[in-house]
Amino acid sequence: MSPVDRADPSYRVRHSTAHVMAQAVEEMFPEAKLGWGPPHDRFENGFYYDFDLPRALTPEDLPEIEARMRRIIRGNHSFEYRVVSADEARRLFEGQPYKLETIDDLVEGKDEYGEARSGGPVISTYTQDTFEDLCLGPHLEHTGQIPLDGFKLLDVSGAYWRGSEENRMLQRVYGTVWPSEDDLERYLWQREEEEKRDHRRLGAELDLFSIRPEVGPGLALFHPKGALVRTIMEDYWRHRHRTGGYDLVATPHIGRSGLWETSGHLRWYRDGMYAPIDIEDEHYYLKPMNCPFHMLIYKSRARSYRDLPLRFAELGTVYRYEPSGTLRGLLRVRGFTQDDAHLFCRPDQMRAEIDRVLDFCLSVLAAYGFANPEMELSVRDPRTPEKYAGSEADWEMAESTLAAALDARGLQHRRMEGEAVFYGPKIDIGILDALGRRWQASTIQFDFNLPERFDLIYAGADNQTHRPYMVHRALYGSIERFLALLIEHHSGALPVWLAPTQAMVIPVTDRNLDYARRVRDELAGFRIEVDERSERMNAKVRDAQLQKVPYMLVVGDREERLGGVSVRLRTNEDRGLTELSDFMDRLHEVVAAKSGL
Ligand SMILES: [Zn+2]
Ligand SMILES: [Zn+2]
């Protein structure tokens, strides 16, 4: 596990900063036992060092370590390299058990990550100031080249020596180092913003979903509010598909092994599938994809050229094995609902079909406020044509159709040569969130393999049988992932049309409670709640704001007398006294436009 590329230009500065940190910690704790300290990618431009210390470090220790590091940096100490013999190294690092273990490895020709090292055993050290470390480098020339105000220590956490639970737990101090203070500040701001927007934290705070150990990792429970948002997304999806020329289908969660053999999943995708379930002496598998079922729906009757194109769409929940270490909130889960569709068409319909599905995806994404997606076109590696299913002519046609559809819309795209999967080229649509992060959303994927494997045919106008073209398409990607993206993009303040509670009616005193309920009933059809708790009004306003409710409708004696509501926004803007009918009109407008407040 070489975490970082030594040729990376930032390697030297990160590595050198790690050594300076180790010197600083050793000054604070002369009895420290040192582990390793390479660059690391947990944080951007990151580095760490592992220590075995007489006491646990706390975040309060970090500023002192940083201050000592600055003093060392200001000393402009040069990093001196020297090669030593094994005996000499063992003398130098007497009393440093982790270093002695590493020396044994080096003698055996492994590097500091325990991997075989090319060029035979070399034991070397780097020294700066009073600190000498067993090290292969490379390093900066001197400590003064480390940006004095460009580094920061970010975290202390436990780490087993060599990553093995059988070994002793060391303390790992993480830091990051940037060319300037401005770069560091920008990075820290971005990181803080990402933490604030983390959908796992917001999902708990807004009571949207949870992932519980009793159920298992990667399996999300949607609470009433989260399920409501999800249902609104699904309803919108269904509405768009039904009015967009798709047929909705529904298929089971499991299917017998023969199906997955026909589809090729048991051969090519087995690692992503769970162990079979035995039913009446037969193996059944949880579905990792919906495709085989849709192929069988196509095959359920004879198809003629007049039936095409056919578009089958399903919100199908699939189950895929993901290692537990890679799971992350709703972004990477083990059970998720794909918003899937399969398009079947004749060759002469291909271009129109691709135009149509591309416009469809862009229009639905735009409804969520993602107007400028990033497009990637994945095509064959022309040097290895034998790797791919389907004929040369099919690939030519498919690749040029996808490219032409993008060009016709003036959509800039990156052409990813060799990135196509073996069964067909594809378009990936990525969207940028409020922090400029790219998220993979829709995929439009040709498939020359499955129609073959399932022997899909239609009767042509020429009375001959023909093979239809087939395209897989996911729009959100998955409901869970897209919801995670929406939560992070909006910092939990979902647009009014998606907000689980669109307005909270807040009575000023108990005698306004009846009026508050009347306001709610007048707004029937919207998602309106009355805060009936006996809290003070300001506390209720604050709580509704924390729950990111778009509108707070404060009703007291004056509002009651005039038949209105005082409108406060979650942004804290005060819109003042508004007639109820005016507010209702506004709400209609905002929900229809899917934006604004
Ligand atoms: Zn080193
Ligand atoms: Zn599919």
Image: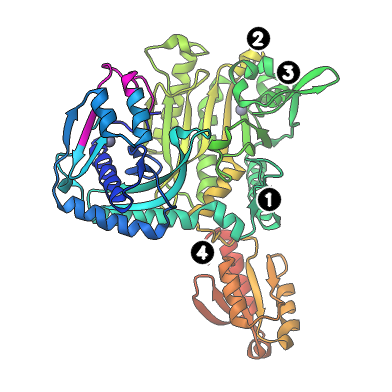
Q: Mark 2 belongs to which amino acid?
A: Gln
3D distance between C-alphas at marks 2 and 4: 55 Å
Q: Main secondary structure of the magenta part?
A: loop
Sequence-first disc among 2 and 3:
3
3D distance between C-alphas at marks 2 and 3: 32 Å
Q: Give me the disc on residue 493.
A: none
Q: Identify the residue at horizontal 60%, vertical 39% (top origin).
A: 333
Q: Mark 3 belongs to which amino acid?
A: Ser
Local crowd size for mark 3, using a 10 Å CA cut-off: few (<14), some (14–19), many (≥20)? some
- Rendered-image quadrant of the N terminus: top left
**Colour option used:** rainbow
Q: Are marks 2 and 1 in contact (CB under 8 Å)?
A: no
- Residue with the mark numbered 4: 596
Residue 540, x across and y down, in percent = 62, 77
3D distance between C-alphas at marks 4 and 3: 50 Å
For this rendering, which residue is in front, 136 or 416?
Answer: 136
Q: Identify the residue at horizontal 68%, vertical 37% (top origin).
A: 317
Q: Mark 4 belongs to which amino acid?
A: Gly
3D distance between C-alphas at marks 4 and 1: 26 Å
Nearest to viewer (mark 4 / mark 3)? 3
- Residue with the mark numbered 2: 464
- Residue with the mark numbered 3: 257
Note whether 219 is above or below 464 in the view shown: below
Note whether 337 is above or below 458 in the view shown: below
Q: Are marks 2 and 3 in contact (CB under 8 Å)?
A: no
The region drawn magenta spans 106-126
Classify residue 562 as left or right of residue 124.
right
- Residue with the mark numbered 1: 222
Q: Which secondary structure, mark 4?
A: loop
